[in-house]
Image (cartoon, rainbow, N blue to C red):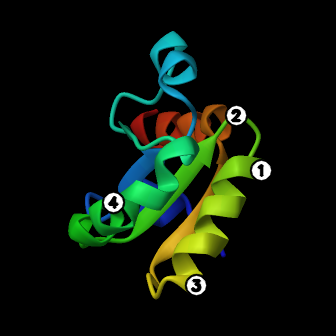
Amino acid sequence: MDLQPLINSEDAVIVDVREPGEFNAGHLEASINIPLSQLGHSVERYRELGRPLILICHSGNRSGMVTQFLRRQGIKEVYNGGAWTDVQRLISRKAA
């Protein structure tokens, strides 16, 4: 699936699943941080967002794990966006 249209829409929420230190060292301005280490306590927070979710991390591995977990929890509109820097480039293309 081509995520660029969803990434550039205001309908989706971009969630960075890296740990707070990693997030604070650099992140997408429009993203929120819900670390993988807090996943067990965050499922309801994900549900409450109520919009399509694009998950990102450093390489796509952690966001992929969280994507699969959330789908098993019944959250259907969740996508692995991969590396946050790759998603950043997709956002930049829209602005250009």
Mark 3 or 1, which is nearer the eye? Answer: 3
Going by the numbered disc 1, the residue's amino acid type is Asn
Instruction: Determine the residue positioned at 64% across, 31% down.
Output: 85
Lower position in the chain sequence, tag 3 or tag 1: 1
Q: Nearer the viewer, mark 2 or mark 3?
A: 3
Give the residue at mark 4.
9
Disc 4 to disc 3: CB gap under 8 Å: no
Residue at image mark 2: 58
Is 74 situated above or below 32? below
Q: Quadrant of residue 4?
A: bottom right
Q: Is residue 41 left or right of residue 40?
A: left
Distance of label 2 from label 3 (alpha carbons): 23 Å
Q: Amino acid at mark 3?
A: Arg
Distance Cα–Cα, label 4 vs label 3: 25 Å
- Of labels 1 and 4, earlier in sequence is 4
Give coordinates of residue 46: x percent, y percent.
Answer: 34, 64
Circle on res. 72: 3
Q: Label 2 vs label 1: CA separation?
A: 8 Å
Q: Residues within 10 Å of mark 3 (few under 14, many from 20)?
A: few
On residue 61, which mark appears? 1
Which is nearer the N-term, disc 4 or disc 3? 4
Whether pointer 2 and pointer 1 mark residues with C-beta atoms closer than 8 Å, the reply is yes
Whether label 2 touches label 4, CB < 8 Å: no
Above or below 91: residue 14: below
Residue drawn at (46%, 33%), measured in percent from left and top?
96
Q: SS for tag 3?
A: helix
Work out which quarter of the rendered image holds the N terminus and state it: bottom right
From the viewer's perspective, is residue 1 above or below residue 18? below
